[in-house]
Amino acid sequence: MSSEALPKTVVPSGITDEVERARAELKAALAAIEIKGNLPRRASEATARKVAEAKAFARREPALAAAGAVAVALAVGAAVWGIARLLSKR
């Protein structure tokens, strides 16, 4: 397995030079920190995963997906109506 096929956060095995190994470990640690700390990227990836799951569910169960969409729309509408009603009483 070549080092190009490894993820950025993995230290390649077989490094015998201590300095080279330390550099590889530092590079992997910095890549892991960057991945963990990049919240917008992580949120975007999580959103894309959930959208793909929702689309797959809608293809498998279109009636349930439609019912779920209606339920969410009703809940959002009720919340907006309730907030508007509370604000209008002030």
Image: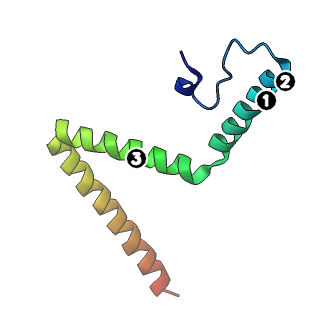
Residue in the foreground of this view, choosing between 21 and 42: 21
* Secondary structure state at the residue bearing disc 1: helix
User: Residue 72 sits in which quadrant?
Assistant: bottom left
**Left or right: residue 44 compared with residue 49:** right
Which residue is denoted by mark 3 in the rendering? Answer: 48
Residue in the foreground of this view, choosing between 58 and 83: 58
Which mark is in front, 3 or 1? 1
Amino acid carrying label 1: it is Arg
**Left or right: residue 54 compared with residue 6:** left
Q: How is the image coloured?
A: rainbow
Residue in the foreground of this view, choosing between 27 and 79: 27
Residue 41's x, y, as percent?
A: 54, 50
Determine contact: label 2, label 1, CB under 8 Å. Answer: yes
Local crowd at mark 1 within 10 Å, few (<14), some, or many (≥20)? few
Mark 2 or mark 3, earlier in chain: 2
Amino acid carrying label 3: it is Ala
Determine contact: label 2, label 3, CB under 8 Å. Answer: no
Amino acid carrying label 2: it is Val
Residue in the foreground of this view, choosing between 12 and 74: 12
Rendered residue at 47%/79% (across/down): 86
Which residue is denoted by mark 1 in the rendering? Answer: 23
Q: Which mark is residue 61?
A: none
Q: Distance between the residues labelled 3 and 1?
A: 34 Å
Q: Residue 19 carries which label?
A: 2
**Left or right: residue 58 compared with residue 90:** left
Looking at the image, which residue sits at the far left? 63
Local crowd at mark 2 within 10 Å, few (<14), some, or many (≥20)? few
